[in-house]
Image (cartoon, rainbow, N blue to C red):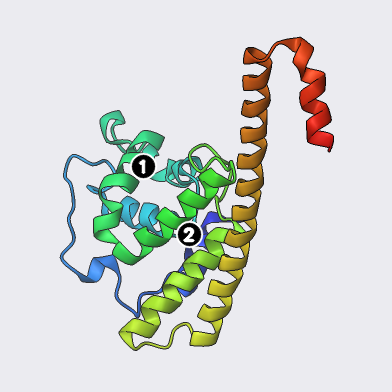
Amino acid sequence: MTDLAEMSHASDDLLDTGGATGDDFAIHLEPRCRVCRNDVVRRKVNDLLAAGATYAAIHRAVAEDNAGVDEADRVTVDSIRRHAARHYPVQNVAKATYREILEQRAKENGIDFVDGVATAITPMAFYETLMVKGYQSIVSGREDVDANTAMNAAAKLQAILDTRQGDADISGLRLQVRQLADAVRSTVPQSMWADILAKLED
């Protein structure tokens, strides 16, 4: 299993926003949030969210921090989930965009990003994140991700999406055929079914 501390450091390379972190700006800290009110925990949780860690993995990573505080102040999986939904996007705008991509692709692929073991990273999430990061760096004038890399990521992402679209079209057609067959069975007398099949074979 990947070490979460390594993931956090590795994410800095992929998700670096040009040296500026959420802590360099006036950020919104919610005093009622168990994650926000502890700077060390907030940084750790935000870094692990950016790295693609599941909520359960993040909860395990803050176990040591939880040990030294009152029960009312302990970070739970639910408090991590709420923080990710309400405060993380405000504190880490770019990284929150990447996390949103990651969670969306994880849902599409049936990956449990809440209770999963380590990460919810999928190839599609990686390509889409790289494409978005490339776009952001091109628009901002920074050269963190070169245009060629971003274009390759965009092309790969589009190829995957096109393939999936074809699968969705075939699934839709199958559903329509099944519905048509059910409609015929329910409205046409059984004595006429052979005639209908014969017409279809012509």
Which residue is at a point 39% across and 84% down the rendered structure image?
138
Locate residue 49, reporting x and y percent. Answer: 42, 54
Q: Against 12, is 49 above or below?
A: above
Locate residue 172, reporting x and y percent. Answer: 60, 41
* Count of numbered tags: 2
In the displayed structure image, the side of residue 24 where residue 53 appears, left or right: right
Q: In this view of the protein, which residue sits in the foreground, 157 or 14?
A: 157
In the displayed structure image, the side of residue 84 where residue 116 appears, left or right: right
The image quadrant where one finds the C terminus is: top right
The CA span between labels 1 and 2 is 14 Å
At label 1, the amino acid type is: Ile
Residue under circle 2? 51
Q: In this view of the protein, which residue sits in the foreground, 37 or 48?
A: 48
In the displayed structure image, the side of residue 96 where residue 193 appears, left or right: right
In the displayed structure image, the side of residue 138 where residue 111 appears, left or right: right
Secondary structure of residue under mark 2? helix
Q: In this view of the protein, which residue sits in the foreground, 59 or 125?
A: 125
Locate residue 174, reporting x and y percent. Answer: 67, 37
Q: Against 140, is 167 above or below?
A: above
Residue under circle 1? 80
Which residue is at a point 76% across and 16% down the rendered structure image?
192
At label 2, the amino acid type is: Ala
Secondary structure of residue under mark 1? helix
Locate residue 13, reporting x and y percent. Answer: 48, 74
